Image: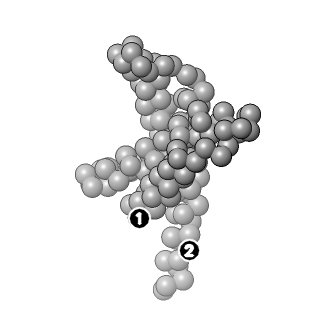
C-alpha cells in the first residue's frame, strides 16, 4: 500500500502541474495532448492505485496482474466515456481518452512491478 500512496501523491502532483500550467498551450501537438489526454493518463494510474488502497483497507486481494488492471481500467473507461455522456449532458465520448486510461493502467503495472522487485531485493539485503 505504501507504493500506491507514493504513486497517488506523485501523479496528483503531476496532475496539478499540468492543470495549472498553461505554458505548453502554444506548442501544437504537445499542447493538445497536455490539455486533452494527459489528465486521463494520470487518471488511469491514480485510479488503479486508489482502488488498490481501498482493496488493502478492505483486506481484499489487490489488482496486480496486467490483464486484470487493463480489463478493470477498460471497463471504467467505457463507463466514463460511453455511459456517462448519455446521462450527463456536458460529457462527451472519446476513444482516445479510453486509450489514455489504458496507457495509465499499463504505466501503473510497470511501476508496481519495478517497485515490487526493489522491495524483494531490499528484504534480501536486510537478512
Closer to viewer: mark 1 or mark 2: 1
- Mark 1 and mark 2: Cα distance apart in space: 16 Å
Element type at marker 1? helix
Residue 54 % position (x, y)? 31, 50
Q: Residue at x 47, y 52 (%)?
A: 12
Viewer-proximal residue among 12 and 113:
12
Residue 10 % position (x, y)? 50, 58
For this view, does 24 lie left or right of residue 94?
Answer: right
For this view, does 85 lie left or right of residue 23?
Answer: left
Q: Quadrant of residue 9?
A: bottom left
Q: Quadrant of the N terminus?
A: bottom left
Viewer-proximal residue among 31 and 116:
31
Q: Quadrant of residue 102?
A: top right
Q: Residue at x 62, y 39 (%)?
A: 34
In the rendered image, the vertical position of residue 44 relative to residue 75, given as above or below: below
Q: Residues within 10 Å of mark 2 (few under 14, many from 20)?
A: few
In the rendered image, the vertical position of residue 123 relative to residue 97, given as above or below: below
Residue, far right: 28
Residue 36 % position (x, y)? 58, 32
Counting residues from the N terminus, which is met first, the one under dot 1 or under dot 2?
1
Residue, far left: 58
Per the image, the residue denoted by label 1 is 2
Per the image, the residue denoted by label 2 is 121
Circle 1/circle 2 CB separation < 8 Å: no
Res 106 visible: no
Q: How many marks?
A: 2
Q: Residue at x 53, y 77 (%)?
A: 122
Q: Residues within 10 Å of mark 1 (few under 14, many from 20)?
A: few
Amino acid at each position: 500500500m505504501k507504493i500506491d500512496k507514493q504513486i497517488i501523491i506523485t501523479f496528483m502532483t503531476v496532475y496539478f502541474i499540468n492543470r495549472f500550467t498553461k505554458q505548453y498551450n502554444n506548442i501544437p501537438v504537445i499542447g493538445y495532448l497536455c490539455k486533452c489526454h494527459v489528465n486521463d493518463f494520470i487518471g488511469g494510474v491514480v485510479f488503479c492505485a486508489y482502488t488498490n488502497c481501498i482493496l488493502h483497507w478492505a483486506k481484499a486481494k489487490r489488482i496486480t496482474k496486467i490483464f486484470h488492471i487493463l480489463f478493470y481500467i477498460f471497463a471504467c473507461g467505457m463507463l466514463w466515456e460511453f455511459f456517462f455522456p448519455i446521462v450527463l449532458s456536458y460529457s462527451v465520448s472519446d476513444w482516445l481518452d479510453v486509450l489514455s486510461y489504458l496507457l495509465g493502467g499499463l504505466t501503473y503495472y510497470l511501476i508496481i512491478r519495478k517497485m515490487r522487485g526493489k522491495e524483494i531485493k531490499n528484504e534480501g539485503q536486510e537478512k
